[in-house]
Image (cartoon, rainbow, N blue to C red):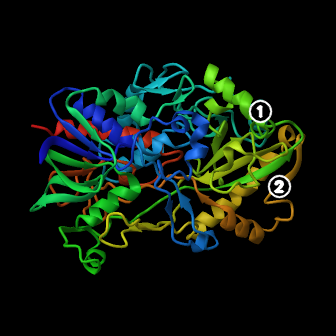
Amino acid sequence: MQTYDFIVVGSGSAGSVLAERLSASGRFSVLVLEAGGTDRRFYVQMPLGYGKTFFDPAVNWNYKTDPDPGLDNNTDHWPRGKLLGGSSSINAMVWIRGAREDFDAWRDAGNPGWSYDDLLPAFKALEDNEAGADQWRGIGGPLHITDCSTAVHPLTNRYLAAGQQAGLPLNRDFNGAVQEGVGIYQITTRNGRRMSAARAFLRPAMKRKNVRVEMNALATRILFEGKRAVGIEYLQNGETKTARAGREVILSGGSINSPQLLQLSGIGPSALLGALGIPVIHANENVGANLQDHVGINYTYRGRLPTLNQILRPWWGKLMVGMQYVLLRSGPLSLSMNNAGGFFRTDPALSRPNMQLYFQAFSTVIPKSGERPILTPDPWPGFSIGLSNCRPSSRGEIMIRSSNPRDYPKIVANAFSTEADVAEMLAAVKFVRKIAAMPAMADIIEEEVLPGPSIKSDADLIQDFRKRSGTVYHPVSTCRMGPDAARAVVGPRLRVHGLAGLRVIDASIFPDNITGNTNAASIVTGWKGAELVLEDQK
């Protein structure tokens, strides 16, 4: 059995950062265990190629929720990255940190060191923002962030104008002084290629002699001596292997895999573990509980002006944008499908935005079986205005079904299970229609395709968003951070309550969800977590 100072389970947004930061001094050895394979795939590196990875089992766990009463009993598809870089290698690349108030609330919940002012230096240090440095943005860091303001589809400017006509300010930087308003999203790309956590952090770390990355290595159990974690058992190429950690085991599997591995290892709800015949190492009812996620829906329109549909659908258009991408690393394939978006409040009395907007200059009403139809849009000029809630009050859970680590856990999302979540989504979809009714958009709209003009009453609107909504892929909080071991899984220094030598460092530790896409906050959690780990080494 080989011994390393640190074993990091998972090479995703946080795990990749940990591998780089913990190994940088050369003082410590790091083993990274990744259940998936390489990120060196064309459709992973090409930004818009994530439509091809949406169902691809070679790079995607392809999780499914249980039928959800809040979503008209639909079973939701939950893609999660199963490759180097984790979900940062298959996501939509939008770079949103979250609101100042989100992180200040983390601190106020008893987690010193996690306020916005505490994390801002870390955000700036890890960023290389093409928009330039200021008091909010950083340059020169390992993670390149692209300013797309000159590259978006012309229709995007009409969306921005309509948003302003509807009362929202124009926001040139959602990661700046304020988050509210409409604007163009910054994305994690560089020179037309995806800038995943693997590309920014893990690949440089892999060049060091003190870093070892094992791919296709499924962690099956945390090994303990008493209450101290001392290693990991994992499956690789049909063989059971073990590795020992001289200092710490760090779980960075994300909001599904981290609680799953804890439960498989005897850390979790005692009744669940007992029923599955798993010996209890440490009982904690919060492992896998408190699941939060952002839920979203699109309103789709047939337009009078050309959209990306007219370029991305015909063979000659595909050939044109393909050549543009291969030769110049530019064009639609070098961008996210979310050119622009924004944040707004459904109630002026709220202290910060509670809804996020997305603008897509194409439409995919007519589905194609087996792939997310980004590259096969509708045969007419269409576009979508989407939205998702930012801090829903609904809570779900992720619990293992058996003691077999290959069995997918049971995901109960409980979307729209509170009256507050239903009320704010009802107000939000009405606001989307308000944007579409503004002159800048109304002038070029032929008709609303989804849900359609017949859906008018509150009851019909609610029924529609229950039927058509789904995850926007931001699950968090299943190993949440907090000072009270009776209510949390890890403490403010990300050590698992009641155990030694074991931390969780990924999005599962978020005390509450953030206002926006979760990749940036996951990466900064890896950065901050590495600082905590290094501070605690004697």
- The disc, 1 or 2, on the residue closer to the chain's N-terminal end is 1
Left or right of 13 in this view: 212: left
Q: How many marks?
A: 2
Residues under numbered marks 1 and 2 in contact, where contact means CB atoms less than 8 Å apart: no
42 over 417 or under it: above or below: above
Residue 64 screen position, x and y as percent: 51, 64
**Gap in angstroms between the C-alphas marked 1 and 2:** 24 Å
Give residue 130's position: percent from left, percent from top: 53, 21
**Depth check: 185 or 399 in front?**
399
- Looking at the image, is 174 positioned above or below residue 498? above
The residue to which callout 2 is attached is 449
Callout 2: helix, strand or loop?
strand
Q: Which mark is residue 335?
A: none
Task: Point out which mark residue 317 bears.
Answer: 1
Coordinates of residue 320 in the picture (x, y in percent): 74, 28
The amino acid at mark 1 is Gly
384 up-or-down from 276: above or below: above
Q: Residues within 10 Å of mark 2 (few under 14, many from 20)?
A: some
For badge 2, the amino acid type reads Val
Is residue 38 visible in the rendered structure shown here?
yes
- Residue at 68%, 25% (x, y): give it: 323
Comparing labels 1 and 2, the label whose residue is closer to the camera: 1
Q: Nearer the viewer, residue 234 or 227?
A: 234
In the rendered structure, the answer to whether residue 438 lies left or right of residue 115 reads right
